[in-house]
Image (cartoon, helix red, strand yellow):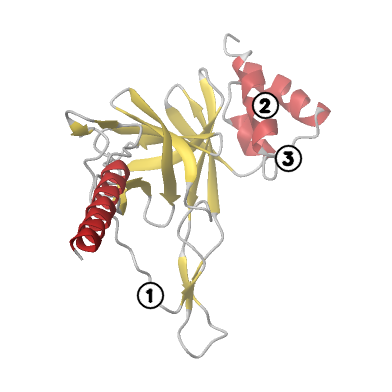
Amino acid sequence: MLSVRMKCLSRFFLLVLTALVSISGFAQDPSANHDPVYGYDALLYNGKIYYFTPGPKTSGTPFLSDEFDTRGSVTVRDVTYPGLNINYDIYNQQVILKYTDAIGSSKLIEISQAWLKSFVMNGSLYEFYLRADSTKRIYQVFGSGKYRVLYYQRKDLEIDNTSSSGRRYFSEIQKESYVQINDQLHKYKNSGSFIKAFSKTQQDLIKTYIRRHNVDVRKANTFIMTDLINYCNTLAGL
């Protein structure tokens, strides 16, 4: 009988020890930005808990990406943090970080805009831009140089007029297009207004490029617009 009890106790303590080791290993699975001595980097993990519920009858998503676990990077105070699970809440104009805390719980926080400079999602660069009225906007950015193309994107929360139940839905992405020249934003809606944003000496050359390459700035993809603005940068000295 004593032998049986000892065996049972041995098995019990073995199970307890195994469970403790498993929990310890899970809890010590930190993210790439977790320091074992100083904890989570306060520069990055200093935002508010993200909590946004548009309502049970709302369809669509406020986010840029349907898949939340999009790997990207953010730059805060000139420090870049790669390999993060982030998403862009276009409706609320917030960058949301998903991470696992020290006890293994999944968390969503709004990355503080106080020092957030830029972020990259799906290979696209987004930057915060301070406007003349001192408000900040998030823009998707193309090109690097004196001239750049910027897209401001938004989503609206609409009421479904075809339903009597008051259902709401998030709209498709709405876009405003700008050319940035000498830190000034010039809005454009077509090729004509795009060309007019540049100096007289550059306009004919840009018009020729657009016609030769059949560029429609209203519908052109990111690669075509990047090529166009990079060409415009070759004319910066004219």
Q: Quadrant of residue 208?
A: top right
Residue 227, quarter of picture = top right
Task: Report whether 138 appears left or right of 164.
Answer: left
User: In this picture, is 171 found above or below 227?
Assistant: below
Q: Earlier in the sequence, mark 1 or mark 3?
A: 1
Marks 2/3 in contact by CB < 8 Å: the verdict is no
Identity of the residue furthest to the bottom in this view? 164
Give x and y (percent) for residue 144: 53, 21
Of circles 1 and 2, the one toward us is 1
| Amino acid type for the residue under numbered disc 3 | Asp
Q: What SS does tag 2 mark?
A: helix
The residue positioned 63% from the left and 28% from the top of the image is 226
Q: Give the crowd class for mark 3: few <14, some 14-19, many >=20 residues within 10 Å.
A: some
Callout 2 amino acid: Leu
Residue 216's tag is 3
Q: Kindly identify the amino acid type of the residue bearing the numbered disc 1.
A: Gly
Horizontal side of residue 144 vs 135, given as left or right: right
The residue that mark 2 highlights is: 228
> Percent x, y for residue 31?
34, 37
